[in-house]
Image (cartoon, rainbow, N blue to C red):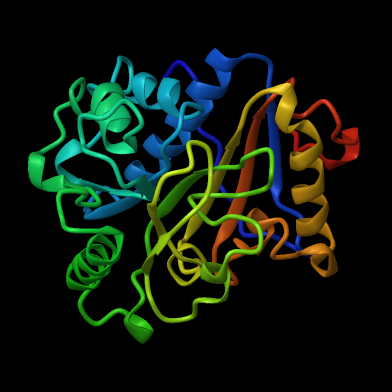
Amino acid sequence: MAHPVRGIRPNEGGAPGVFVLPSATELARAVAGRLWGVARERAAGPVHVLLSGGETPRKAYQTLAAEPYRGRFPWGSVHFWQADERFVPAADPRSNRRMIGEALLSRAPVPQENFHGIDTSLPGPAEAARAYDAELRQAFPGAPGGVPRLDAAVLGIGPDGHTASLFPGSDALAERTALALPVEGGDPPVPRVTATLPLLNAALRIVFVVQGEGKAKTLRDVVAAFRDPSLRSPGLPATLVAPRRGAVVFLADAAAASRLPPEWRSMG
């Protein structure tokens, strides 16, 4: 492969793996390599991966859909889910589903039934959240506590510390049962549906992808909270994504990592 696939290890002492890539292109390759590694580990399938929206992961999805990954990735065994969605029509430029479609689904041989999107054709965000919650549960019959254990979740971090569509101070951060909820907030400020902490914190692997100097301070604060759990706060929602039985890794470009102390960075 063009980019080495590094294993994701469970966190020890709250310190996650933090890998710094020199460019946006290398960052995209690192994300694609992680996903290929997850799929390879579970060769017998099925594999369930949660995908974030926004612009940060677009290049990573395009990279996964291109060689050398495209020809080796077990597309028929991997199911893709959405981390969140803006409640706009699927063809709207603001739609995460549209971005994932353009970057991945239209470029790779993903079976139609293997993409599980949040349905914004329903009457409202509440109905869409309930339908998505039900689909998740149906895909994982007998899951402990009724909460699916996804193989991996690719998440971004906003300048305000939000992840998925879990925004600072949101009531959704206190949710303990539902897997998806309707929420407000963000930029653009439109109604949304988001995966909740119970779903994210049941995942086997969390891959945070962070790009750009504008997120450098936030990334430092989030990583600090993973190293010292007393710093975790609803004011910085990404710090609450901390699966007890899963692994967390940060992949950042050099600009986003510019405020990280050297000793916080992982080697290899």
Residue 33 quadrant: top left
Q: Can you name the residue that lies furthest to the left here?
A: 112
54 vs 117: above or below: above
Residue at screen point 43% across, 20% down = 59
Residue 41 in view here: no
Q: Is residue 221 left or right of residue 156?
A: right
Q: Quadrant of the C terminus?
A: top right
Task: Name the spot of residue 114 as percent of width and height, x first.
Answer: 15, 46
Image location of residue 53, percent across then percent down? 41, 37
Q: Report if residue 166 is visible in the image.
A: yes
For this rendering, which residue is in front, 64 or 161?
161
User: How many tags in the picture?
Assistant: 0
Q: Residue at x 14, y 41 (%)?
A: 76
Residue nearer the viewer, 140 or 46? 140
Q: Residue at x 81, y 37 (%)?
A: 217
- Please state the horizontal and vertical placement of residue 47, each as a whole percent of the image: 28, 52
Q: Which residue is most to the bottom?
A: 145
Left or right for 44, reference 52? left
Picture residue at 20% right of the left edge, 25% below the top: 108
Q: In this picture, is 67 found above or below 87?
A: above
| 249 or 166: nearer the viewer | 166
Dividing the image into 4 quarters, which one contains the N terminus? top left
